[in-house]
Amino acid sequence: MAVSTKTRNLAFKQLGAYIRQNEMRPSRVREAVLEQICQLQQPFTAEQLVQGCETQQISVATVYNTLNLLVLAQILCATSRQRGKASTEYEIVVGKSARVQVICTKCGRVTDIRDRLVEQIVKERKYSNFVMRHYSLFIYGECKVCRSHKRKEK
Ligand SMILES: [Zn+2]
């Protein structure tokens, strides 16, 4: 499912601000990649994005460069997943100030969780010479399903 119009607009707004702040030239190709990302099911892999951009004749190098830029601009968040093999998945996080996820290292299942205590603690943290804008917290372990499989094997 594509992201909401509200999230899409926020992402484009943030990209525009990042381009201005860093005195870069606006690029139609970059915007086309972001548009494609907004159409993808979240989270997505770089390979899925490359496939989606094929019809628009956007080069693989441009897709990867844009992915990196969107991570730096805090529009996307990259997460390492282990589904058999290690891979990186991306997700639009613009507009979200907090993200806590539990990730199963056996099957790769990712679940967004709401942990108000953690959110409260992080919100009140102050770091010298640093202003926190948002954060992601990934908690790795084993999900209930994988744990029950393990018990049956014993
Ligand atoms: Zn699992």
Image (cartoon, grey):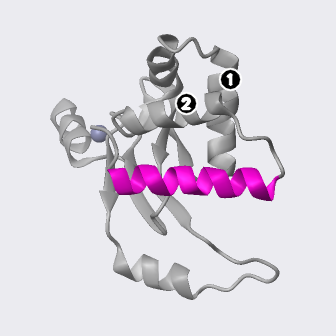
Label of residue 62 in the image: 1
Q: Residues within 10 Å of mark 2 (few under 14, many from 20)?
A: many
Residue located 47% across and 48% down the image:
92
Q: Are marks 2 and 1 in contact (CB under 8 Å)?
A: yes
Residue under numbered circle 2: 33
Q: In which quadrant is the C terminus drawn?
A: top left
The quarter of the rendering in which ligand 1 is drawn is: top left
The CA span between labels 2 and 1 is 9 Å
Residue located 20% across and 41% down the image:
145
Which amino acid, by three-letter code, is at mark 1?
A: Thr
Q: Judge by depth and name the residue closer to the eye, 2 or 43.
A: 2
Earlier along the polypeptide chain: callout 2 or callout 1? 2
Magenta region: 5-22
Could you say which quadrant of the image residue 69 lies in? top right
Residue 82 visible to the viewer: yes
Residue 74 visible to the viewer: no
Task: Label 2, secondary structure: give it.
Answer: helix
Which amino acid, by three-letter code, is at mark 2?
A: Val
Using residue 34 as the reference point, say whether residue 2 is left or right of it.
left
Instruction: Provide residue 109's location: percent of width, then percent of height.
Output: 32, 40
Q: In which quadrant is the N terminus drawn?
A: top left
Residue located 28% across and 47% down the image:
143
